[in-house]
Image: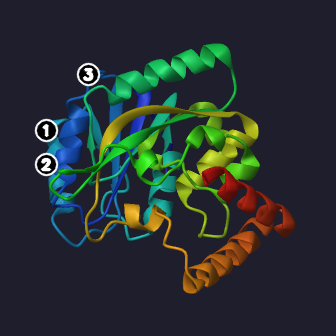
Amino acid sequence: MNKIQCPTPVAILMATYNGEKYISEQIESVLNQKFDKWTLYIRDDGSTDSTPDIIEKYATAYPDKIIQIDKGGSNIGCNDNFYMLLEAVDSEYYMFCDNDDVWTLDKVGTLIKTMHDKELQHPDIPILVHHDVTVCDENLNVIHDSLWKSINIKPWKFNTFNLLMTTPIVAGATSIFNHHVKQYVFPIPSNKRIMYDHWIALCTVKHGKIFCIENRFNLYRQHEGQVCGLESMQNNACSIEVLKRKITNWTRDAQLFHTIGVPKWKFFYYKIKSNIIKS
C-alpha cells in the first residue's frame, strides 16, 4: 500500500467493524470538533452489517475530510486494522478513534494544545498524551463520571516502562501522539496478545514521555459486542478462583514479554509492584 501524506496536522484513524448502530454518532462528533485541522481515515474490517454503506455516505459527503483506506478489505482483526491505518498514513500527529464512542467538541483542540506545550518542554522526542473518559451505557446514560476513578487507577503513577508493561492503562481512543512515536512502533511484535495501544504506549515510554490529563473527552459506550469493555478492566472480587486465574494470566503475560526481551522475574516483580500501587 502506498503511503498517504495527511494534508492536515492531525490524522484521526478509525477502525470499524459492524458498528452500524453507533458509527454515525461517532463520525458526527468528529465532524463537529471546534478544531478542524484534521483528516479522518477509516478502514472497515469486513463488516457484515451496513457499516460500509454508512462510511461511504460520509466519505462522499465530506471528501476533503474523510478518506477510506483499503476499501473492501478483508477481516484482519482490531489490532492489525489500526496498525494498517497507522502504517498507511504519514502525519505530524495521530489519534485513534473507535466506532462506538462520542467525542466532546473540544477534544482535538485541547489535545493538540497540550501536545504543543509538552513538545516545547521536551523537543524532538516521542510524546503521547492520554485522557480519562465518561463511562456510559449504550444510550449514553452516564454510568461513571470517570473511568479512572471507577477502576481505582492513577495513570500518572505508571509513567515508566516497567510499570506500564504490567498495567495497560493507555487506551488508543483516548490518545494523541506525535510522529516521533511511529518510528519505534514498527515492526510490530509477532505475539498478537499485545494490544496495539499498549504496544504504542510502551514504545513511547521507552524512548520518550507519556502524559495524562484528567479531562473526559470521550463518552465511552458500554454495549454488547465491543472488543474491550469496562468489565474486562475492573478488578474482580477476591476468591481462590480469581487468584488462580490471575496467576495463570500473569504467567502467560510474563512469557509474552519474555519474547521481546523482558526477563520473567522482572515482569513478576513489577506486576506485584503495580498492584501495590493500585491498592
Decide: few, some or many residues near mark 3? Use Cα within 10 Å; few <14, some 14-19, many ≥20: some
Q: CA distance from mark 1 to mark 3?
A: 19 Å
Q: Position of residue 17 (x, y in %)?
A: 30, 64
Q: Position of residue 248 (x, y in %)?
A: 66, 81
Q: Is residue 252 left or right of residue 105?
A: right
Amino acid type of the residue tagged 3 in the rendering: Lys
Residue 152 higher or lower than 242, as above or below: above
Specify whether 113 is left or right of 103.
right
What's the mark number on residue 57?
2
**Residue 46: horizontal and vertical position, in percent?**
31, 68
CA distance for labels 3 and 2 = 22 Å
Helix, strand or loop at mark 3: loop
Is 272 on the left-hand or right-hand side of 230? right
Q: Nearer the viewer, residue 62 or 29?
A: 29
Which three-letter amino acid code belongs to the residue tagged 2?
Lys
Question: For mark 1, does the 10 Å Cα neighbourhood hold few (<14), some (14 to 19), or many (20 or more) residues?
Answer: few
What residue is disc 3 on? 34
Name the residue at 68% across, 78% down: 247
**Of tags 1 and 3, which is closer to the observer?**
3
Q: Callout 2: few (<14), some (14-19), or many (20+) C-alpha neighbours within 10 Å?
A: few
Q: Is residue 187 visible?
A: no
Per the image, label 2 sits on a secondary structure element best described as helix
Q: Which residue is mark 1?
A: 61
**Which one is closest to the eye, mark 3 or mark 2?**
3
Image quadrant where residue 232 sits: bottom left
Residue 257 image-quadrant placement: bottom right
Q: Is residue 23 left or right of residue 218?
A: left
Question: Which of the pair 202/78 is nearer the observer?
Answer: 202
